[in-house]
Each structure stands twice: as C-alpha cells, then as structure tokens.
Image (cartoon, grey):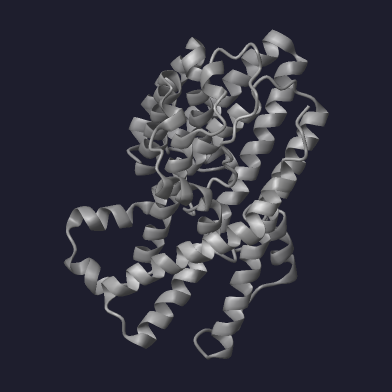
C-alpha cells in the first residue's frame, strides 16, 4: 500500500440478507471463506515485500530465482487486494440498509471501534521500539511531534502533510476516506432518488476511470481519489452478478487499468474479477477454505499493522545471532505471525466484538 496497507476492516461475517437480495443463498453463509483467505495471503505478500525492500537477507535474494525475487519485490500490490476486498465487504455489509444520518454515524462509530484500538496499539509499539533502538544506540532519538501523533490518531497524517510514523499507516488514511465517501454517496443517492443514484454511479465511475489510468496524481497529497478505483472495483464485484450496469462498469474499468500498465491496477482488477465470479458461482463461501489460510486471514489486520517494526527488530536480533539468511527469514516470519496472533487475541478480537454491538439501522 503500505504502498502498503491493509484493508483495514475486512470483516466477512454475513448478517441475514435483505429479502430482495438475489444472492440470498450465498449471503446466508456465516463466513465468506474466499475473501478471508485472500486477505491473509495479501497480508503475507505485504510482509514479504517489506522484508525484501528493507534490504534484509540481500545475499540470499541475490542468488534466488527471478520468479521468487519478483514475488517479494511486488508485494506492495497486496494493498490492491486489500482495497478491492474492502469495497466488496463494505458493499455486502451495507446491502439493504436504508441510507440515513443514523446509518452514517453508526457506521463510522462501528468502524472506529473495530479499527482504532489495534491501530493505536501499533502506534504505541512503533514508539516503544523506536525508544529502545535509541537507548541501545542503534538509531537516533525518535523525531515525532505532538501534532504529528495527533494526526495519526485520526487517520489524517497524510492529508495534513505529516510523515507516517510507520510506512504502512498511510493506507489506513485511504481506507477511512473510502468508507466515509462511499456512505455519504449512498445518502445523496437516496435523497435524490433515481437521479441521485444515477449521479452517484457516474461520480464513482468517473473518479475511478480518470485516476485508474495513472495519468493524473491526486490533487491533494493523501486524498483518496487516485486509488479509489481499487476500492470501487470491489464494490462492483459484489454488485455485478445481480446488476448488468455494474457489470458493465467493471468491464469498462479494464481499459484505464490496462492503460496504466501498473501491477497495482492489474492486481486490483483481477481480485475484483475473482470475487465477482466466485460470488456468482457460490465459490465465495468455501473457496480456499483451509485452516492455515483462514487463520492467516483472521490475524491479517494485526499482521499488517505490526509487521514492519517487528521485521526490523527481528532481523536486528538475527544479525546479532548471526543466523543464516534463510533461517532469519523463517524465524522473522514466525515471530510476525506470533505477534499478530497475540495482538488479535488481546486487542483486535475484543474491539471487533464490541463493534458488533452497534447495529446498523
């Protein structure tokens, strides 16, 4: 995304669908296994990217096959998977809901309770590890200001021009903007009926098509528009099996994505196609259902949030112990999974359970 980021909230539990939902047999499943597995693989891909981009185990990568190096070097595209999954899941979670200010407020509160505690814990971890590095003489004193920290707490650091405390955090700023813009758009569409729905569709598609080609940068640093297409492709993937209009929009977005020649764009589009086809066929319920992948998907948010400082600290210790590169990689990956599992159990799971108490109207 991160460019790295995780899809910040990709809860795939399915509530009882609206009676008008043509995908009722699919949506009735308690869990969508395929998105869960995909987000776990995406999180692992991002971890591999930072492991490689951080210059760790460079001698091993110098001898590795090109295909292996390519996988590590392009792991930032795992963020594209996160964004598409996020759009898919948000579209699912809001299906049949009546847009209102109550929906917006409850939605924002629910997401805040779900996302904030793990994110704040990750910020605290970065600060603590930075202080430890300083105390042992491995790094200069952390240069973090009060306003910079405050901006982070509200996902506003990128928009306000502050450097990210952890490189992966910027994508969370995008995720929050995606959520708020999407729900406000639903309110506008509902307020102006048929004309409103048509206008919102055109706005969503227009933003996606203009920036997906990669010819324009965001008008403001940190503004979501340049990566909106990845999130919107996920929304279209959820709607496409039941809506020819949305299926057509999704097909048309192939053109700017192809023009961009960007791995990020291709990964987002391919992810959306996989989700749309799997939803139409029912594969979304049980596709890639395996305990390791589902476990990885469960801890993916924590894995994404904590992996960068954990990876740096892990290789620092591995260098002291003079571990061979391959042993260091395996050990660091194992430590990352263990830390993510602990963070999930201690912070993320309780926050998730609390957020579920807030019902959407």
Which residue is more in the foreground, 360 or 198? 360
Count of marks overlaid on the render: 0
Residue 119 shows in the view? no
Lateral position of residue 258 relative to residue 243, left or right: left
Residue 252, how many percent across, how many down?
Answer: 41, 20
Q: Nearer the viewer, residue 327 or 102?
A: 327
Tell me the residue at 37%/80% (across/down): 318
Q: Image check: 266 left or right of 241?
A: left
Residue 70 placed where, x, y %? 26, 53
317 above or below 68?
below
Q: Is residue 25 left or right of residue 99?
A: left
Vertical arrangement, residue 22 with respect to residue 272, above or below = above
Quadrant where the C terminus is found in the figure:
top right
Looking at the image, which residue is at 42% across and 46% down? 291
**Residue 93 horizontal/vertical position (percent):** 63, 30
Report which quarter residue 64 is drawn in: bottom left
Question: Could you say where residue 334 lies in the image, as x and y percent from the top left?
Answer: 41, 66
Can you see residue 2? yes
- Determine the residue located farthest toward the front in the rendered image: 291
Q: Which residue occupies 44% across, 75% down?
A: 314
Location of residue 96 with respect to 74 vertically, above or below: above
The quarter of the displayed image where residue 262 is located: top left
Task: Pick whichever, 43 or 31, lies toward us.
Answer: 31
């Amino acid at each position: 995304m991160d460019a790295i980021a995780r899809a910040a909230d990709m809860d795939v539990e399915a509530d009882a669908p609206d009676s008008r939902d043509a995908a009722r047999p699919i949506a009735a499943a308690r869990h969508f296994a395929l998105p869960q597995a995909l987000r776990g693989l995406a999180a692992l891909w991002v971890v591999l990217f930072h492991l490689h981009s951080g210059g760790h185990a460079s001698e091993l990568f110098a001898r590795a096959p090109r295909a292996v190096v390519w996988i590590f070097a392009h792991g930032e595209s795992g963020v594209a998977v996160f964004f598409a999954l996020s759009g898919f899941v948000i579209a699912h979670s809001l299906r049949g809901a009546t847009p209102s200010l109550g929906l917006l407020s409850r939605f924002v509160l629910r997401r805040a309770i779900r996302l904030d505690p793990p994110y704040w814990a990750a910020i605290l971890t970065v600060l603590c590890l930075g202080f430890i590095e300083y105390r042992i003489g491995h790094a200069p004193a952390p240069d973090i200001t009060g306003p910079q920290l405050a901006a982070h707490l509200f996902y506003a650091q990128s928009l306000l021009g502050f450097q990210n405390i952890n490189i992966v955090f910027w994508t969370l700023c995008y995720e929050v903007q995606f959520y708020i813009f999407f729900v406000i758009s639903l309110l506008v569409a509902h307020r102006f009926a048929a004309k409103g729905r048509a206008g919102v569709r055109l706005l969503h598609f227009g933003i996606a098509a203009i920036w997906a080609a990669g010819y324009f940068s965001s008008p403001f640093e940190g503004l979501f528009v340049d990566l909106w297409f990845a999130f919107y492709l996920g929304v279209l993937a959820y709607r496409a099996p039941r809506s020819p209009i949305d299926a057509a929009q999704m097909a048309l977005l192939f053109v700017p994505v192809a023009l961009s020649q960007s791995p990020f764009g291709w990964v987002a589009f391919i992810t959306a196609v996989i989700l749309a086809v799997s939803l139409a066929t029912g594969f979304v319920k049980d596709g890639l259902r395996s305990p390791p992948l589902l476990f990885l998907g469960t801890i993916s948010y924590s894995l994404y949030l904590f992996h960068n400082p954990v990876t740096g600290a892990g290789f620092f210790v591995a260098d002291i112990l003079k571990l061979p590169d391959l042993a260091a990689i395996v050990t660091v990956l194992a430590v990352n999974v263990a830390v993510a599992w602990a963070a999930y159990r201690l912070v993320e799971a309780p926050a998730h359970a609390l957020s579920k108490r807030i019902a959407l109207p």
